[in-house]
Image (cartoon, helix red, strand yellow):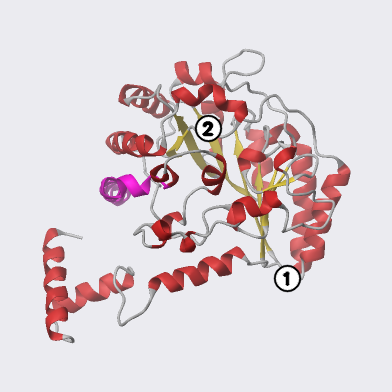
């Protein structure tokens, strides 16, 4: 909103309070219409909080959508220093695959959408399992008339042309790949298990992958990072021709489990990170990278709050959080058996409701946060302000950067 429009809005507000239902000029009415369209204001006494709670609860208990995060293997070709999965192995058996498909088959009549996220370990080490499950899922979708979508989280090292083409055929539309800064830092933090470097191969793979599907490039941020390191990384990405082929976002590196407790001292807390990322996104803007981060309304924060969403490890164990996968003490059951919704490991994360929390209920960013990470709230002894998403601490600055990015991209598009 421009300063002129803001002044106009405040004048409209003051007159409305004094006069009840004043008449407006065409210019004022146009501003009101735009604000109503963007849902910044609502006519009448409509209770937005109650509406938001309604949609939140509807999403929580929706069984027409099934979300499965499947780890076909816990094996990995990297030895990341902070990995919470430790040194796990194992591949999904035919029995577990059959149980997953049986679960979908049994619920097929009510399903409208099945969304699969491939996870690990490194999922590309089990491409044959991905193919097997996907082909069966697509057949079930045709039989029961539900939509099938999928995405993947990968370290990118095995994202060869051959695998990219296979994944496209298997309806994988988006892949998140992680890098940890420029080559000199990434290769130290994320080496291959054989000790070799991974950075150059990943960037080479992304050149092709970025032309075939959406690539989200996550950069894990800890206290090693400053503006100089980010600029060094951006220059390397530009030299590789990836400026227009990937969307970059910054992720807070957290000591989420005991397996990665060794990195705790090098991690920012959420408040510190929210301030740090402002400068990093400004650098993206200055270097001409598109910024896809946007504070959008969500009905639930993550799969922990959805009754019909689970992480499945190679042994069929079910979890409500990515951070738990492979830790049987946090399993809520097994896909071979009926889902036990009263299992404490299910309820531990599912039970929190932001609308019953005094601070969350009145928070202006509730629609884009929904109380933040349930696992962070349940498992870690952190200050209340650190439970909130970074938008709580940097919304105004980030909105300005995002607006400038949109303008920048519009100018580029106009020249093409």
**Mark number displayed over residue 178:** 2
**Mark number displayed over residue 75:** none
Q: Callout 1: helix, strand or loop?
A: loop
Q: Residue 101: horizontal and vertical position, in percent? A: 81, 54
Specify the segment rendered in magenta: 388-416
Q: Which residue is mark 1?
A: 110
In-front residue for pair 245/37: 37
Above/below status of 111 relative to 169: below
Above/below status of 225 relative to 269: above
Q: Residue 309: horizontal and vertical position, in percent? A: 66, 55
Residue 250 visible to an observer of this rendering: yes
Q: Residue furthest right?
A: 95
In-front residue for pair 360/315: 360
Q: Callout 2: helix, strand or loop?
A: strand
At x 52%, y 43%, the residue is 376
Query: Residue 408 in magenta?
Result: yes
Q: Quadrant location of residue 312? A: top right
Which secondary structure type mostly characterizes the magenta part of the structure? helix
Q: Residue 70: horizontal and vertical position, in percent? A: 71, 45
Instruction: Give left or right: position of 96 versus 174.
Output: right
Circle 1 packing at 10 Å, graded few (<14), some (14-19), many (20+), is some
At x 15%, y 65%, the residue is 5
Circle 2 packing at 10 Å, graded few (<14), some (14-19), many (20+), is many
Pick whichever of labels 2 and 1 is earlier in the sequence.
1
Query: Residue 169 in magenta?
Result: no
Task: Estimate the spatial distance between the alpha carbons at disc 2 and disc 1, rounded to whole Å.
Answer: 36 Å
Above/below status of 150 relative to 260: below
- Tell me how many marks there are: 2
At x 29%, y 72%, the residue is 41
Q: Quadrant location of residue 308? A: bottom right
Q: Residue 298: horizontal and vertical position, in percent? A: 47, 59
Instruction: Give left or right: position of 42 versus 205.
Output: left
């Amino acid at each position: 909103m421009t300063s002129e429009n803001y002044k106009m809005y405040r004048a409209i507000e003051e007159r409305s309070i004094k006069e009840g239902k004043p008449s407006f000029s065409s210019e004022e009415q146009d501003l009101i219409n735009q604000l109503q369209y963007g849902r910044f204001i609502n006519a009448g006494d409509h209770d937005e909080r109650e509406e938001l709670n309604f949609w939140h609860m509807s999403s929580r208990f929706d069984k027409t959508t099934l979300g499965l995060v499947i780890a076909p293997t816990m094996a990995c070709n990297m030895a990341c220093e902070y990995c919470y999965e430790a040194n796990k192995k194992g591949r999904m058996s035919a029995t577990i695959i059959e149980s997953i498909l049986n679960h979908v088959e049994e619920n097929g009549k009510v399903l409208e959408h099945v969304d699969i996220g491939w996870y690990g370990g490194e999922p590309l080490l089990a491409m044959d399992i991905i193919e097997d499950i996907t082909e069966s899922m697509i057949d079930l979708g045709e039989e029961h008339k539900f939509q099938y979508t999928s995405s993947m989280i990968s370290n990118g090292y095995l994202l060869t042309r051959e695998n990219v083409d296979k994944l496209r055929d298997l309806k994988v539309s988006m892949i998140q790949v992680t890098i940890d800064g420029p080559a000199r830092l990434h290769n130290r933090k994320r080496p291959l298990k054989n000790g070799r470097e991974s950075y150059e191969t990943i960037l080479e793979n992304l050149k092709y992958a970025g032309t075939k599907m959406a690539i989200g490039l996550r950069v894990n941020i800890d206290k090693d990072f400053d503006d100089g390191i980010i600029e060094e990384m951006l220059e390397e990405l530009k030299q590789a021709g990836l400026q227009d082929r990937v969307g970059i976002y910054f992720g807070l590196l957290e000591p989420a489990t005991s397996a990665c407790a060794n990195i705790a001292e090098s991690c920012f807390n959420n408040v510190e990170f929210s301030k740090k990322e402002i400068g990093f996104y400004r650098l993206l803007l200055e270097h001409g990278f598109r910024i896809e981060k946007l504070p959008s309304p969500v009905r639930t924060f993550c799969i922990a709050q959805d009754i019909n969403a689970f992480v499945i490890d190679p042994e069929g164990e079910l979890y409500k959080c990515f951070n738990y996968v492979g830790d049987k003490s946090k399993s809520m059951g097994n896909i071979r058996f009926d889902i036990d919704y009263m299992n404490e490991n299910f309820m531990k994360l599912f039970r929190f409701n932001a609308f019953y929390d005094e601070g969350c209920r009145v928070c202006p960013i509730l629609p884009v946060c929904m109380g933040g990470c349930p696992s962070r709230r349940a498992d870690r002894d952190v200050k209340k302000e650190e439970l909130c998403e970074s938008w709580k601490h940097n919304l105004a600055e980030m909105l300005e950067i995002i607006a400038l990015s949109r303008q920048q991209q519009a100018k580029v598009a106009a020249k093409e």
